[in-house]
Image (cartoon, grey):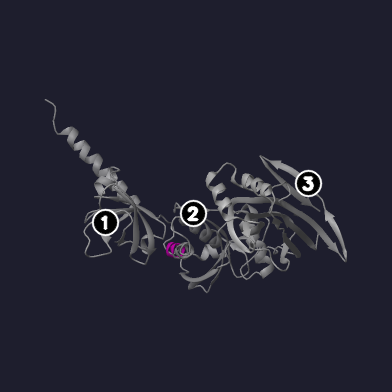
Amino acid sequence: MKNPYGPIIAIIVCLTISATSFAADKVSSILAPLSGERIAIVTGEKAFTALGLRDGIIKGDVGLIAPDQQQAAQGAYIGQCAVVKNGAASSVCEVITLKKEISGGDLVFFNRVTYSDPNVYPVAIAMLSDIVEPYEPYKPLKIMVYGIFDEQHAITGLSEALRGEIRHIFSQKKRIQVADGAEFRDFVFYPGAGQDVLRSVRAKMQKSDIDVLLLGKYSSDGQSITLNMTELSAKGADKSWQFSLPAAGYADSVAKVVLPPQEETQVETYPCYIFVRGGTAKVMKPNEKIDVIRHEAEGNAFTELSLKRSDFNIMSPVEIKVKIDNAVVLDGQVPATPLSLPLSAGTHRVVVSFHRGYFFDESLVHTSQKEVRKEINLELHTVKNLSLDVQLSPLFDQDTITVKAFERIGKQQQVLRPIRRVEWDTTIETFKD
């Protein structure tokens, strides 16, 4: 006769192994309501967890809620919880999805952060927590760890180990994309670089959609290692940190020079002046107004009724934006004076846009929801005094936005002729010197 307990014992063993494996990959905590008067937690409410920075938990992490560890190992989750605030040993998370009310004793599980160097782990988590703090918890971030150098600007074995460990820890967070930095392959700069270099760095970051760039410098006295790290943000809100690591165990990697100091890239910038001019158009005759409403509404009855009620008599560009390499240089109305900014040699992307504003005399009565937009490329190599003349027209014709590029030489202007190319349905002008 066969042993009837054999299959049952096998199932129990499998469940035990599964739960053990699951526990190794997760950190967990009981969820507690913020209010002591509440017993259950529902979607949209916040709750305490006993997990924080020491557990690798940062703002934006999403945990899975389950009644207990065994059910979680079997995939029996009842909801999700996103961290909105964290501390060293605790955090506050908001319940974002839920199949049923959370009861006392229910657990939240987060992915465990793995690391190779216990000295670097708290450094990386502390920096990452500071980096994500200004952003909404759900916003993905693209981060590049440019380099970490010794006092002579050499890349050492320790430099590579620190950079690799920080990248590894960052990459375990789902909202973080660690960038490879293709834009910077032939660009060399070090901590303490001048403003001209940093402007060029930010331009490269914007071209690659990099939100944050990290670089650092370390020194060692044989007893401890002092690590200074700097965050360059695409928004311009930079941060700096200083950490101390024990020197024991790092002597060989400190002594190993992987790449000696390189000559810094020389960045030469030239002035660029942008003249923005916005035209106005009077709409007085009934047939003209009917034609404008037809073009603007494009069959939308609500827009048509709104324009008819507004009784407009003037059209003019509003909500004007000019962006160069993803950096906003104008956001609002036509400026009274030309915009001025430095540009380096190379290719730059310029985007100009506006919305049509409908006025009754001087009062804005309706703003179009449709954006009028034009993109051009500037390929600059020899031009050293560039001017862009931007003309905006509110009329419904092909020349709503015209851009002319020229180089000012003394009192003369040398016009740069555009080369037109079509990408899908969009015509892009490229001005090449």
Cα distance in 3D space between marks 2 and 1: 27 Å
* Residue 212 shown left or right of residue 291 in the figure: left
Cα distance in 3D space between marks 2 and 3: 36 Å
Residue 41 is labelled as: 1
- Label 1 or label 3, whichever comes before in sequence order: 1
**Residue type at the position of mark 3:** Ile
Question: Which residue is rendered at x = 20% and y = 40% of the image?
Answer: 12
Q: Which residue is mark 2?
A: 140
Locate the N terminus and report the quarter of the image it occupies.
top left
Looking at the rendering, the stretch of residues picked out in magenta corresponds to: 121-125
* Residue 374 shown left or right of residue 29 in the figure: right
Position above or below: 75 against 118: above
Q: Position of residue 142 (x, y in %)?
A: 53, 55
Res 324 visible: no
- Cβ atoms under marks 1 and 3 closer than 8 Å: no
Q: Position of residue 277 (x, y in %)?
A: 73, 60
Residue 419 is labelled as: 3
- Label 2 or label 3, whichever comes before in sequence order: 2
